[in-house]
Image: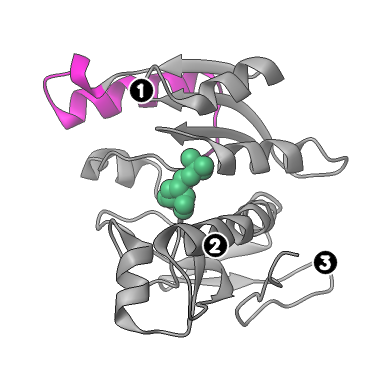
């Protein structure tokens, strides 16, 4: 399955996906990376890996719809079948979301539906929860909403700062996103009644995925 990745910055999740997709037998390949920022570090990763890139700055377009149409044109031209948002920091128009419905994934650094939006890790710490994590979900019009493909749980430690927690959640994201993409690209994960059903390869994954703490 041909995948297009949308980024805005560092691109570490894109890098994790790229590494996984280059493993033999992985059911997806990344054919293009689109960034809305020319200075996104993720673009360097793509260049070094020989992946096609496009910079489409939202500032060059009068409307969200026009910006999204420009991205859509690049995705279609590259033959993309599935879009993966990986740290992409723009809200998408309803039309774009509808066009790619059930063919667009996002990763968010919390156990959705908790802690949608920005400043997730500080809000997580401030709330006092003991467990957080990461979620890969199909994209819907509302931000950080949509059928959940996979989740990873990460402990919140007593001395965590937003940064130390973000670092540990990010390590879990790098395991989770390739796993979720594999499930979707292989056809093992599908949406039914706005929930994701997972089957195939002899396994049934019905509960959350717990990724061990690194180290
Ligand atoms: C990740 O924490 C992701 O969950 C969130 O933005 C961050 C992107 O990091 N949506 P990177 O650009 O993939 O390194």
Q: In x, y percent, where is residue 100?
A: 40, 43
In terms of depth relative to the viewer, which is nearer, 12 or 56? 12
Indicate whether residue 83 is drawn in magenta: yes
- Give the CA distance from mark 1 to mark 3: 39 Å
Question: In what element is the residue under mark 3?
Answer: loop
Of the numbered discs 1 and 3, the one sitting upstream in the chain is 1
**Would the CB of label 2 be found within 8 Å of ligand 1?**
yes
Question: In what element is the residue under mark 1?
Answer: loop
Image point (44%, 19%), residue name: 74
| Magenta-drawn segment | 58-84
Image point (66%, 49%), residue name: 185
In terms of depth relative to the viewer, which is nearer, 176 or 32? 176
Q: Residue 169 carries which label?
A: 2
Of the numbered discs 1 and 2, the one sitting upstream in the chain is 1
Q: In x, y percent, where is residue 54?
A: 45, 16
> Which residue position is annotated with label 3?
201
Image point (79%, 75%), residue name: 203
């Amino acid at each position: 399955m041909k995948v297009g990745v949308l980024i805005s910055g560092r691109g570490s999740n894109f890098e994790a996906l790229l590494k996984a997709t280059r493993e033999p037998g992985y059911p997806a390949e990344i054919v293009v990376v689109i960034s809305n920022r020319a200075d996104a570090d993720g673009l360097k990763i793509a260049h070094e890996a020989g992946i096609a890139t496009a910079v489409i700055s939202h500032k060059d377009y009068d409307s969200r719809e026009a910006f999204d149409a420009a991205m859509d044109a690049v995705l279609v031209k590259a033959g993309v079948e599935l879009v993966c948002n990986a740290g992409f920091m723009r809200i998408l128009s309803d039309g774009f979301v509808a066009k790619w419905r059930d063919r667009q994934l996002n990763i968010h650094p919390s156990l959705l539906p908790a802690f949608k939006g920005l400043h997730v890790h500080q809000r997580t710490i401030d709330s006092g929860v003991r467990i957080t994590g990461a979620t890969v979900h199909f994209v819907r019009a509302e931000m950080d909403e949509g059928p959940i493909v996979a989740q990873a749980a990460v402990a919140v430690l007593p001395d965590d700062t937003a940064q130390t927690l973000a670092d540990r959640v990010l390590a879990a994201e790098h395991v989770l996103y390739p796993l979720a993409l594999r499930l979707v690209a292989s056809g093992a994960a599908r949406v039914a009644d706005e929930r994701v059903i997972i089957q195939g390869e002899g396994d049934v994954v019905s509960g959350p995925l717990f990724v061990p703490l690194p180290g």
